[in-house]
Image (cartoon, grey):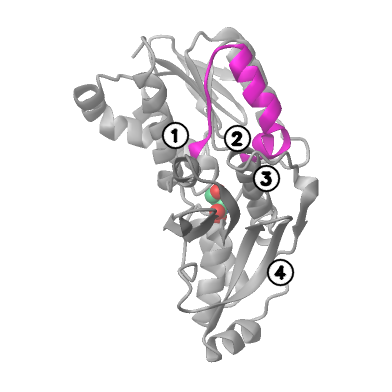
Amino acid sequence: MKLILIGYGTVGQSFTRIVLTKQKELVEKYGFSPKIVAIVDSKGAIINPEGLNLKKALKIKEEGKSVAVDRAYGHLNMSGLEAIENVEADIMIEVTPTNVKTGEPGLSHITAALKKKMHVITTNKGPLALALPTLLELATQNNVYLKFSGAVGAGLPVLDFAKKISLGDRIVAIRGILNGTTNFILTRMEEGIPFKNALEEAQKRGYAEADPSLDIDGIDTACKLVIMANWIMDKETTLRDVRVEGIRNIALEDVRDAMKRGFSVKLLGFINEDLVVKPTEIPKQDPLCVKGILNAITFKLELAGEETIIGRGAGGKETATAILRDLLEIAQTSVIM
Ligand code: HSE
């Protein structure tokens, strides 16, 4: 199966690292041998229809260069759209940084790939939060998959879990921690570390968005609410429908004061009648009261009551496992492996 990878930052690189280490297992266990034929970063592309040398691509990135510098296969300044147009592949993986204003360049990449009848896997929240119903329709029209398991919860299969528990039942409300970076920051603040230092640490560990204001101002959580509302609850909503307040104004004293009273401050997202993101004090014994990079989401069901799912909600490796999951699901229903 031939893949194009567009976006070669934390998530993209983690994905190629996993493909390299799991190569043998993928063939033995699933009969699946993915061939990455193009990788595009912000400065160009590297293309080989026979399959790229991923070790070499990773080494170039570790040296801080663009994959396009490769002498034999590099294409300086080639864009994602040009790669989609010129390279034959079965699947396009889109992991460029989230842009919530226009969804670009991810939105155009996804649209072009679907029109070219490639399956698409993405973890890019911008295009999904802005245009999920349209993109799903386009995928259906072209008889291909659009998969985005890693867009909510990173490696934690929040969307799949929600779909499963909705079968025969109905999710009436959702509340949860949907952003790892802010949970990491708030946890560090409970340990007395100032906001700024905690954010820097989250950035170094590859948890934060390329533009970390998306995390701390609650936009990333808002995107995830919109994706869930549309995908799980059939609520036609957009980012404009979400009331958003981030954690910029939370001081160390607020966190300490809440702790003394047996509470933790968390950035929560809510889907009820309305979609809301806001810092909220929750009791220590609430199942949502998880620490560090963890996400925790409670689904309220009409029949089954409340169910909570908890797991690591950010990070390159974590998100890349969701891509692999989507990929294997597509491979298992496809003739080309
Ligand atoms: N920046 C996001 C977070 C990455 O911290 O949750 C995962 O979507």
**Distance between the Cα atoms at labels 4 and 3?**
22 Å
Work out whether residue 12 or residue 259 is closer to the camera in this orientation and state it: 259
Label whose residue precedes the other's in the sequence (1 or 3): 3
Give the residue at mark 3: 226
> Which residue is painted at 27% across and 32% down in the image?
22
Question: Does residue 273 appear left or right of residue 181 in this picture?
Answer: right
How dense is the environment of label 4, judged by Cα within 10 Å: few (below 14), some, or many (20 and up)? Answer: few
Asked which quadrant contains residue 259, the reply is bottom right
**Distance between the Cα atoms at labels 1 and 3?**
20 Å
Label whose residue precedes the other's in the sequence (4 or 2): 2
Label whose residue precedes the other's in the sequence (4 or 3): 3
Give the residue at mark 2: 96
Q: Nearer the viewer, mark 2 or mark 3?
A: 3
> Which residue is painted at 55% across and 37% down in the image?
123
Give the residue at the far right of this rendering: 240
Label whose residue precedes the other's in the sequence (2 or 3): 2
Identify the disc placed on residue 248: 4
Work out whether residue 231 or residue 154 is closer to the camera in this orientation and state it: 231
Which amino acid, by three-letter code, is at mark 4?
Answer: Arg
- Residue 143 location, x and y as percent? 55, 12
Identify the disc placed on residue 323: 1
Vertical placement of residue 266 versus 151, above or below = below
Of the 4 image quadrants, the one containing the C terminus is: top left
**Distance between the Cα atoms at labels 4 and 2?**
25 Å
Q: Is residue 14 visible?
A: no
